[in-house]
Amino acid sequence: MDIGVLTVPLGEQPLEDALDYLAAVGVDAVELGCGGYPGQDHLDRGALLDDPDAQDALQAALDDRDLRVSALATHNNPLHPDADRADRADRELREAVRLAAQLDVGTVTCFSGLPAGSPDGSVPNWITAPWPTEHADALEYQWALAVDYWTDLAAHAADHGVDLAIEMHPNMLVYEPDGLLRLREATNDRVGANFDPSHLYWQGIDVTHAIRVLGGEDAIHHVHAKDTKIEEEHARRKGVLDTTSYADTSERSWLFRSIGYGHDESHWKDVVSTLRMVGYEGALSIEHEDALTSGREGLEKAVDVLDRAVFETTPGDAYWAGDA
């Protein structure tokens, strides 16, 4: 299992400077944004697509630092009710899949997207309760759209030998493990999870149990290493569906935190161990969104914790389990 980093917090630096820094702090892999919310500061999708020379230059920069790409990231909303926005997100995803195949990168991380609640809606509608019944009807409408779209996108991914790793995220149709498995079953096995525990923590989902559930279906394609801290004082009063600005850190019910600042090191060792139990051997890609520290400090503290949690060797034979 490699320690990786989603390089977005280092986007103001040229790619080679960012790679130098990450290699120096002990990182093994990078997840590169190539569209959508992550942007493309370190990987210009249009410039590299179908350009072997540009692709070779990127590979040389990685090889010089003993780094690999764990995934290309393009998180956006391909189900947006605004047709122009949906088309742009769809184009980003399809081109990211093609580029991943050309770079021999096996995974594209993304969101499921979220439609409006009806054909004439103009704003994506995140439905979290089945009553009043028009909400259940809206959710059925959304799933019909999603299955139709993702069936075609999953076929595109299969044609290119690339996995689609969906981050289970609030304000998206797929935001928890059951929804992820529902979409996977309705499409193909190229659809799986970019397992980001940070959004599961505040929803009250048991993260190691979720790993076992998804891992048992071989549905974890990529992992984000990102922590969350529940601020009980506020959560007791207003719950966790908190619309307070992320910047208003002292008033939120929960905050994204650097690894080890939401859950202790022993928990992260449990996370790593459970991932190994279900056969995950990819990267733990650190996503820094901690408003209480800088990107560099947050990344370095996360690397420090994960370096003690990640196993460096493959398991040996269980000699102690043999016949007496």
Image: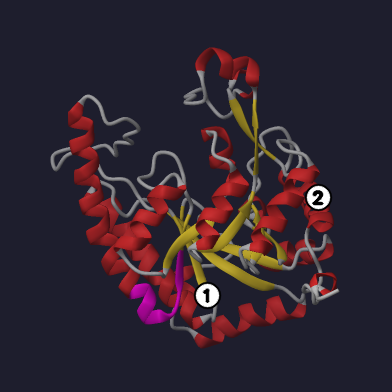
Q: Mark 1 sits on what residue? A: 106
Q: x, y percentage for residue 4?
A: 69, 62
Q: In the image, is residue 160 part of the stretch drawn in magenta?
A: yes
Three-letter amino acid code at disc 2? Val
Describe the element under mark 2 as helix, strand or loop. helix
Residue 168 vertical position relative to residue 45 in the rendered view, above or below: above
Tell me which residue sits at (66%, 64%) in the image: 283
Magenta stretch? Answer: 156-164
In this rendered view, identify the residue nearer to me: 70 or 19.
Answer: 70
Residue ranking furthest to the top: 237
The tag on residue 305 is 2
Q: Nearer the viewer, residue 214 or 102?
A: 214
Relative to 34, residue 229 above or below: above
Q: Is residue 117 visible?
A: no
Instruction: Give the x, y percent position of residue 248.
Output: 59, 23
Residue 148 in picture, x, y percent from top left: 22, 60
Identify the amino acid type marked 1. Gly
Q: Position of residue 120 (x, y in %)?
A: 13, 39
Residue in the picture at 79% in, 45% down = 266
The span from disc 2 to disc 1 (Cα, nearest Å) is: 27 Å
Q: Residues within 10 Å of mark 2 (few under 14, many from 20)?
A: some
The C terminus, quarter of image: bottom right
